[in-house]
């Protein structure tokens, strides 16, 4: 059997750091190279579904994650008038062995980074180190690395294998698939914010409300309530918008660019415009994905997470699918005699599975329930939800998405 030590991971995001822990658990040495000179807690909220928290629990991280997050107790769907369409228990409350957790992306990355440095050593993650190219040979991969803060400093190192976990703008994906093109804009722009505010509903509710044509909101807490009853709340406003071709990938958002859509969203349980207006920093993102690839890598190189299968964030599955990738890749490396065969087996499992999620998120995500209600009511209030959509139809939509994403309750 081939000696598989010295795998290079490009990217210290959620997928890359989790993979480092998986490889360490399997006794395979690795090094992580991250382009950013510092890992600072940026971004907004992440919802970790039970299939991904189960993987992190296997790595001994569940207690740390619980301390930095909140357990989601229910998933609820409302129209833009604040009327309940459907609600169901979430995580352990729905029969899963592990919880559904809501956590700030920066807090999740910090938990993973701390664990990597504890288990693999403080130098396991090299910051300010950009992987720009990799060439696979029969017995090694030659990797070109550039110092982020000084592009004139370049070095080439040999490693046993390379995993590109360098995100949606992956340099390795561009090298492997030069004709792939830029990420595809879905026609929806997102504005995201995190703000401390009073608890709403159960205090552990994940809510999707409204539909894209007239504004959609996703909102959930990231922390348990403080003594004053406030929590760190994550919200995402989604609106159909034409997007200029020169628009930056992510930038500071402006409240006036979208608040008019939500100006009358004042529910008994939440004043949406007031919440948005009280948010200090708003981030703007285009909702994008890319068409699924027939294969991700080749030889001793493969991809993982957003570098492999970027998807529109419609089912809380972006980070989760990256985490599932790591478990599949570790299992393949343990089972196969060579890195090439391991990477091939990994892709044989994960390429079709993630392609289905990518395409389903475009056409029939879990919030398709809200699309149906929007279209059948003409975006007006309803008197009886059962006259709009049956519980059987809702259950079918929900269950179909669970099957696609591989999330099933325990027996």
Image (cartoon, rainbow, N blue to C red):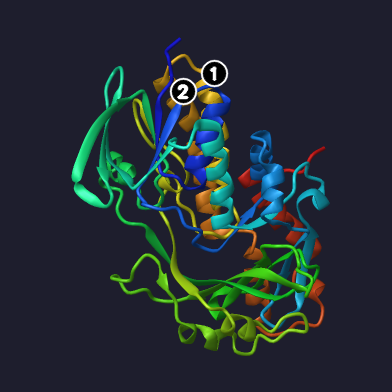
Q: Which residue lies furthest to the left in this view?
A: 152
Residue shown at the point (45%, 51%) measured from the top left: 310
**In the depicted structure, whether residue 98 falls above or below residue 371:** above
The residue beneath circle 1 is 335
Please report contact status of discs 2 and 1: CB closer than 8 Å, yes or no.
yes
Residue shown at the point (23%, 32%) measured from the top left: 156
The residue beneath circle 2 is 342
Q: Residue furthest front?
A: 122
Q: Which mark is residue 394?
A: none
Dot 1 alpha-carbon crowd within 10 angstroms: few under 14, some 14 to 19, many 20 or more? few
Residue shown at the point (79%, 60%) measured from the top left: 88
Image x and y of residue 271, in percent: 69, 84
* Residue 102 showing in the rendered view: yes
* Residue 407 showing in the rendered view: no
Q: Of 169 and 348, which appears nearest the observer?
A: 169
- Does 175 sit left or right of 395 as displayed? left
**In the depicted structure, whether residue 115 falls above or below residue 374:** above
Image x and y of residue 168, in percent: 40, 52
Q: How many marks?
A: 2
The answer to which image quadrant residue 173 occupies is: top left
- Does 78 sit left or right of 362 as displayed? right
The answer to which image quadrant residue 379 occupies is: bottom right
The answer to which of marks 2 and 1 sits earlier in the sequence is: 1
CA–CA distance in space, label 2 to label 1: 7 Å
Dot 2 alpha-carbon crowd within 10 angstroms: few under 14, some 14 to 19, many 20 or more? many
Kind of element beneath mark 2: helix
Kind of element beneath mark 1: helix
Q: Quadrant of the N terminus?
A: top left
**In the depicted structure, whether residue 215 falls above or below residue 324:** below
- Does 276 sit left or right of 136 as displayed? right
Q: Of 316 and 397, which appears nearest the observer?
A: 316
């Amino acid at each position: 059997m081939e000696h598989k030590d010295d795998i290079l991971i490009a990217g210290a995001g959620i997928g890359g750091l989790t993979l480092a822990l998986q490889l360490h658990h399997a006794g395979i040495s690795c090094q992580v190279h991250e382009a950013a000179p510092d890992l600072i807690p940026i971004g907004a909220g992440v919802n970790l579904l039970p299939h991904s928290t189960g993987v992190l629990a296997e790595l001994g991280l569940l207690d740390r994650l619980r301390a930095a997050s909140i357990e989601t107790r229910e998933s609820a769907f409302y129209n833009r008038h604040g009327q309940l369409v459907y609600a169901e228990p979430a995580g352990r409350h729905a029969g899963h062995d592990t919880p559904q957790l809501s956590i700030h992306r920066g807090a999740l990355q910090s938990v993973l980074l701390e664990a990597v440095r504890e288990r693999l050593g403080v130098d396991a993650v090299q910051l300010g180190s950009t992987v720009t190219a990799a060439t696979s040979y029969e017995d090694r991969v030659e990797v070109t690395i550039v110092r982020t803060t000084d592009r004139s400093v370049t070095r080439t190192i040999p490693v046993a294998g390379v995993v590109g976990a360098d995100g949606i703008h992956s340099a390795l994906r561009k090298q492997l698939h030069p004709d792939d093109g830029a990420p595809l804009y879905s026609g929806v722009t997102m504005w995201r914010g995190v703000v401390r505010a009073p608890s709403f509903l159960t205090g552990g509710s994940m809510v999707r409300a409204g539909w894209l044509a007239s504004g959609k909101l996703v909102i959930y807490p990231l922390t348990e309530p403080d003594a004053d009853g406030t929590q760190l709340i994550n919200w995402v406003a989604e609106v159909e918008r034409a997007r200029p071709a020169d628009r930056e990938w992510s930038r500071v958002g402006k409240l006036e660019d979208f608040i008019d859509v939500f100006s009358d969203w004042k529910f008994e349980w939440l004043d949406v415009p007031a919440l948005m207006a009280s948010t200090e920093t708003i981030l703007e993102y285009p909702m994008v994905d890319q068409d699924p690839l027939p294969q991700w890598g080749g030889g001793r190189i493969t991809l993982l997470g957003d570098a492999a299968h970027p998807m529109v964030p419609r089912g809380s599955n972006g980070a989760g699918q990256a985490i599932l990738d790591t478990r599949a890749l570790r299992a393949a490396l343990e089972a196969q005699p060579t890195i090439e065969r391991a990477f091939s087996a990994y892709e044989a499992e994960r390429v079709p599975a993630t392609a289905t999620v990518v395409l389903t998120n475009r056409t029939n995500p879990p919030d398709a329930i809200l699309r149906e209600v929007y279209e059948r009511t003409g975006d007006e209030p309803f008197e009886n939800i059962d006259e709009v959509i049956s519980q059987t139809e809702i259950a079918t939509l929900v269950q179909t998405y669970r099957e696609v994403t591989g999330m099933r309750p325990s027996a």
